Image (spheres, rainbow, N blue to C red):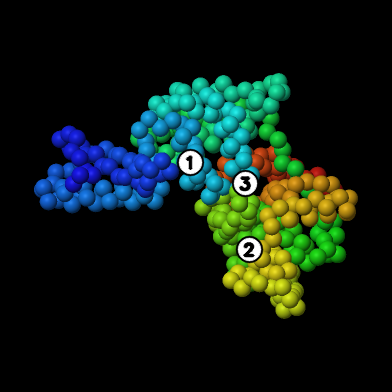
Amino acid sequence: MANIEKRGDHSYRFTVYEKKDAKGRYPRKTKTYTVKKKMTPKQLNEHLEHEYLKFKQEVLSGGYITPERMLFSKFVEEWKKKFAEKELSSTTYANHEFKLTNHILPEIGHVPLNEINSMMLLDLTTNLTRKDGKEGPLTLHSKQDIYRTLQSIFKHAMQWKVIRKNPMEGVNKPKNKHEVKREVNVYEEDEVTAILQTLQDEPFLWRMFLTLSITAGTRRGENLGLEWSKVDFENNRIDITQSIVIGKNGPLIKSPKSLASKRLVTLPPSVMKELKQYRKHWVAEKLKSKTWKEEEREWLFCQKDGSHLYPSSPSNWWSKFSKRTKFRYIRLHDLRHTSASLLIAQGVHAKIIAKRLGHSHISITMDTYGHALRTADQAAADTLEGLFQPKDIQTK
């Protein structure tokens, strides 16, 4: 086996020649493979041949990454091509790009991947400075973004067996006890009532979209990913299984942010009644449309041809609606926060809210809505105080 060469007692070198390049050469890839089990000569030959063919397929399909002395910057390009460009939204991808270009690659881009250790990454994450020309330390949010970028890169380096140990395991997520967390921006109950009332005069699509955002606490992309097959009219709930986001090459249908984001959300009977009316409206719009082309899916929120809305359309409409109606503007995503704050005010347990919003841990809910939860807790204490106050004895 010319392409399988014995190098030691238990190690072998595999060699695969790629297709001819522009200079007429046949580039080759090599890999050292160690046999860890005792085998008969026949078993050994079959095992080596099997492993060699696996390696050959990886090389010829472009899926093999050479680990030997690969610079961190070189692996980042592989990470982009094989993961980030395919799986991440354009916004998330751009954020990773910025952190890499301005903070990470200048520090460790020239270092071989297998020489990067926890201490090196700890120095990088603790000595971060601003790169936008402004004075002052980097914000905690930016530091944590850089941490997440590094985490993703080294996680995939482990998965693809380019490194044997993940150096990020020894690096903690940046924290700053003195930095004040920004409170979420939400509508009060009377504002929600006024908005829902005003929406009665708006197109049914947008009225239903915003009603779900407030009552179900759904993300923008989750609403866009809803299909009629995921609406359970019998049990008054919707099934969140997918999301539509802006990808690098346009809209992308993908799974929600985490396993917990795949969830069933129960809706109030009045909202389900409105959904039934919207369904009738939706069918009527489809029947009278002369441009309908979507036959595989039935998107709740679609364009006149049946295709799903572009991911930025809801935010654009919401911004124009707020200006036109003179309502206090908050981000479309803040309607999700508004939903949570309304539930907290009604005394709903944080664990239920976490499940409803699709948070993977209740700590996310507690951290995000800590102020509202503390306010509700104080209100509960005041209620109990009224129960335990001695009653005035009235005498005739």
Q: Amino acid at mark 3?
A: Ser
Return the disc, 3 or 2, that comes first in the chain's sequence.
Answer: 3
Q: Is residue 215 above or below residue 168?
A: below
Residue 244: which numbered mark, if any?
none
Residue 273 visible in this rendered orientation of the protein: no
Q: Which of these two is toward me, 286 or 351?
A: 286
Q: Is residue 80 left or right of residue 53?
A: right
Q: Which residue is mark 1?
A: 79
Residue at 62% in and 67% down: 227
Query: Real-space Cα distance between discs 1 and 2?
Result: 31 Å
Residue in view at x 62 percent, y 32 percent? 142
In the picture, measured across the screen, residue 24 lies left or right of residue 279, that is: left
Secondary structure of residue under mark 3: helix
Tell me the crowding category of disc 3: few under 14, some 14 to 19, or many 20 or more residues within 10 angstroms, Cα based. Answer: many
User: Looking at the rendering, which quadrant does residue 32 occupy?
Assistant: top left
The residue lying at 18 percent from left, 52 percent from top is 46
Question: Tag 2: Cα neighbours inside 10 Å, few (<14), some, or many (≥20)?
Answer: many
Q: Are marks 3 and 2 in contact (CB under 8 Å)?
A: no
Residue 252 place in picture, x, y as percent: 59, 55
Q: Position of residue 305 (x, y in %)?
A: 70, 69
Nearest to N terminus: mark 1 or mark 3: 1
Q: Is residue 115 left or right of residue 367?
A: left
Mark number, residue 90: 3
x then y, percent, for residue 55: 31, 47
Distance CA(mark 1)–CA(mark 3): 15 Å
What residue would you read off at disc 2? 226
The reply to whether discs 1 and 2 touch (Cβ–Cβ < 8 Å) is no
- SS class of the residue under badge 2? loop
Q: At 53% from the left edge and 49% from the top edge, which residue is drawn? A: 87
